[in-house]
Image (cartoon, rainbow, N blue to C red):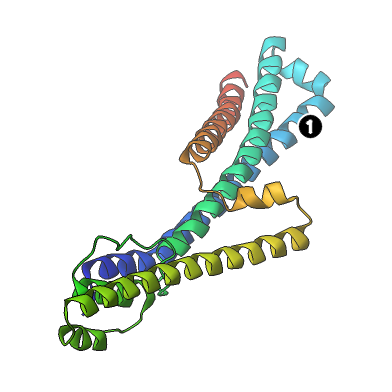
Amino acid sequence: MKRPSEMIRDFFFENLEKSLENQRYNFSNSEKFMLWITGFSIGGLSIIVTNLTQFNQIFEYCVVKTILILLSISILFGIIFRWFFYKYQSQYQGIEFYLRGAFSNQDVMEIDPDDLSDENDIKEIVRRFKIDFDEDLSAFIQVYNNLGETGRSEMKNDLKDYYKRLGEWAKKDYEAGISYVKETYKNAFGISEKKVDKLFEKNSSKPLKISGFITSLALIISCLAFFLVIIILCIAY
């Protein structure tokens, strides 16, 4: 039977892939839609500029100028959308990496164990070994019960010291693994150590929110400018 915390973690881990897949699908569709809008705007701008004399004969000067401005706005915000969309994707991938690690169903040793110096219950000490380091020391309980007061105190102190040393070893092993990954990233991509360290820093939601807001705003403005061109052409023709 799973512990409640394990059940919650496993549930979110199982649904994480679906959520991320939907997010990637939305990314792809948004980008394709924006490419269509920007492509039509560039095509429309090219046609009008190439045949400016003919357009001036059909439409008033202010109408043609307005259309050119709107198409330019659509293209400009299409470029802004693409840049901040790229930044948003990069920031989201960092969060995706963090979520996969946080909700992973792999059992990993505790790298930041609790301080057991004030713990006097031998059963709790043994339980923490099992939970944090998957070490079954339940046999020590029977030995502990057969000891005198001095022996019990010494056993608890020895177990606490061993628990602490295990935590220190696990933390060093974790840091060694991270150092190896950072070094591999640095050599593979040829980037500086500072940039590699930044990849492994805790992600702040503020840059993601800013990039997401600008991306959405650029998409709306670019589409609105393009649709206004269509409306103006339909009315003025």
Query: Residue at (56%, 44%) from the top-left corner?
Result: 88
Q: Is residue 133 left or right of residue 41?
A: left
The quarter of the picture where the N terminus appears is bottom left
Q: Is residue 61 left or right of residue 37?
A: right
Q: Amino acid at mark 1?
A: Ser
Query: Residue at (52%, 33%) from the top-left corner?
Result: 210
The quarter of the picture where the C terminus appears is top right
Residue 116, given in percent of the width and then of the height, sits at 29, 63
- Rate crowding at label 1 as few (under 14), some (14 to 19) or many (20 or more) other CA atoms within 10 Å: some
Please name whichever residue, 39 or 1, is drawn nearer the observer in this view of the structure.
1
Residue 72, given in percent of the width and then of the height, sits at 70, 25
Asked if 79 appears above or below 86 in the picture, the reply is above
Query: What is the residue that sits farthest to the front in this orientation?
Result: 150
Q: Mark 1: which secondary structure?
A: helix
Asked if 203 appears above or below 207 in the picture, the reply is below
Please name whichever residue, 50 or 206, is drawn nearer the observer in this view of the structure.
206
Locate residue 219: give its quadrant: top right
Query: Residue at (84%, 28%) from the top-left corner?
Result: 50
Residue tagged 1: 46
Asked if 201 appears above or below 115 in the picture, the reply is above
Query: Residue at (23%, 73%) from the top-left corner?
Result: 153
Residue 113, given in percent of the width and then of the height, sits at 37, 63
Please name whichever residue, 134 or 151, is drawn nearer the observer in this view of the structure.
151
Residue 140, given in percent of the width and then of the height, sits at 25, 85
Total numbered badges shown on the rendered structure: 1
